Image: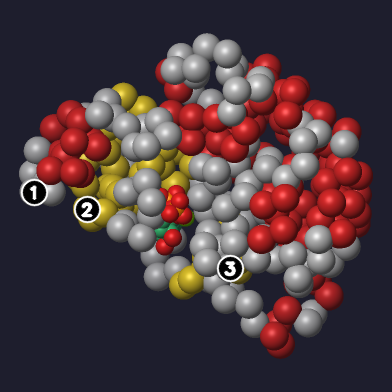
């Protein structure tokens, strides 16, 4: 990931549960920043990076991710004490996603969604979400944006959700994930087996590079959860993809 330094806190994106902020950086770019001082701490940012980099590696449209260095004075001009506290609790590196200006919320569209290539794309997204156990793409909260005639994937903070449980993440790779039945694209996605055939090999070859992108300073928080846990988890998910594909196909 590139690293940039935040120069201005522009506004809070209040629809986001983790209170992400729109931030300007020293490269003149605008980024949606997730702060490590928010609810789930750095582990949600780790999930964003591993899932985001892996998804982009298999060709899914995911805006660029950057490390955003947040200087303490960024919050000084901010009148809202909640935001000031969040910024103060987030020194060092935070996660930025390239802001897509004017992006619209995603909506299913009957005419477009009848095209077979659209069903294939939706199957690719669903297969990817199943791979990384991202349970946060539901009709209520699709975390998909329509921008420049493409559908973009955002918000992978809930991926690898079992990293918050008691078992080591790598050992949870074959656990069923019933929440994926709520996925917004399940009713319209094409064949998941075909999506797996399209992407499994590239995904497997991209795991190490994606995991290598995790900034070291985000890993210190949870000593039991290092890079090797993510690598083991993802390799086992791919080995066992037939199981999650069957689970999803049975849920239609
Ligand atoms: N790259 C982006 N470009 C444009 N808008 C974005 C981008 N990323 C996020 N947003 C907007 O900000 C909102 C909140 O972002 P996001 O979903 O990533 O945050 P969150 O706190 O994890 O949210 P959630 O409540 O879904 O857990 C999105 O629903 C979207 O409207
Ligand atoms: Mg969201």
Q: Residue 68 sits in which quadrant? A: top left
The picture places residue 41, in percent across and down from the top left corner, at: 40, 31
User: Quick check: 23 above or below 251?
Assistant: above
The picture places residue 189, in percent across and down from the top left corner, at: 78, 67
Mark 1 nearby-residue class (10 Å; few <14, some 14–19, many ≥20): few
Q: CA distance from mark 2 to mark 3?
A: 29 Å
User: Quick check: 163 above or below 222?
Assistant: below
Q: Nearer the viewer, mark 3 or mark 1?
A: 3
* Residue 79 image label: 1
Quadrant including the C terminus: bottom right
Q: CA distance from mark 3 to mark 1?
A: 34 Å
Give the camera-side residue of 101 and 84. 84
Residue at 57% from the left image edge and 76% from the top image edge? 107
Instruction: Read off the residue under disc 2.
Output: 10
Residue at 22% from the left image edge and 40% from the top image edge? 7
Mark 2 nearby-residue class (10 Å; few <14, some 14–19, many ≥20): some
Instruction: Read off the residue under disc 3.
Output: 139
Q: Is residue 43 left or right of residue 235?
A: left
Residue at 62% from the left image edge and 19% from the top image edge? 227
Look at the image and tell me whether residue 3 can be seen. no
The picture places residue 206, in percent across and down from the top left corner, at: 73, 33
Q: Residue 162 sits in which quadrant? A: top right
């Amino acid at each position: 990931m590139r690293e940039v330094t935040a120069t201005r806190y522009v506004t809070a994106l209040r629809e986001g549960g983790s209170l992400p902020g729109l931030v300007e950086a020293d490269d003149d770019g605008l980024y949606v920043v997730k702060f490590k001082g928010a609810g789930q701490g750095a582990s949600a940012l780790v999930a964003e990076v591993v899932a985001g980099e892996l998804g982009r590696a298999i060709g899914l449209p995911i805006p660029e991710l950057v490390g955003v260095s947040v200087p303490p004075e960024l919050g000084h001009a901010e009148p809202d004490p909640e935001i000031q506290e969040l910024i103060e609790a987030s020194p060092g590196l935070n996660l930025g996603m390239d802001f897509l200006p004017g992006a619209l919320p995603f909506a299913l569209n009957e005419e477009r969604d009848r095209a077979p290539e659209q069903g294939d794309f939706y199957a690719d997204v669903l297969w990817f979400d199943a791979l990384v156990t991202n349970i946060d793409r539901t009709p209520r909260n699709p975390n998909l944006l329509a921008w420049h005639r493409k559908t973009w994937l955002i918000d992978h903070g809930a991926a690898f959700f079992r990293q918050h449980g008691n078992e080591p993440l790598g050992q949870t790779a074959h656990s069923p994930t019933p929440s994926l039945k709520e996925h917004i694209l399940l009713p319209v996605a094409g064949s998941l087996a075909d999506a797996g055939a399209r992407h499994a090999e590239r995904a497997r070859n991209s795991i190490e590079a994606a995991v290598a992108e995790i900034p070291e300073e985000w890993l210190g928080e949870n000593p039991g959860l290092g890079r090797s846990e993510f690598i083991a988890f993802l390799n086992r998910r791919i080995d066992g993809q037939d199981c999650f594909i069957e689970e999803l196909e049975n849920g239609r």
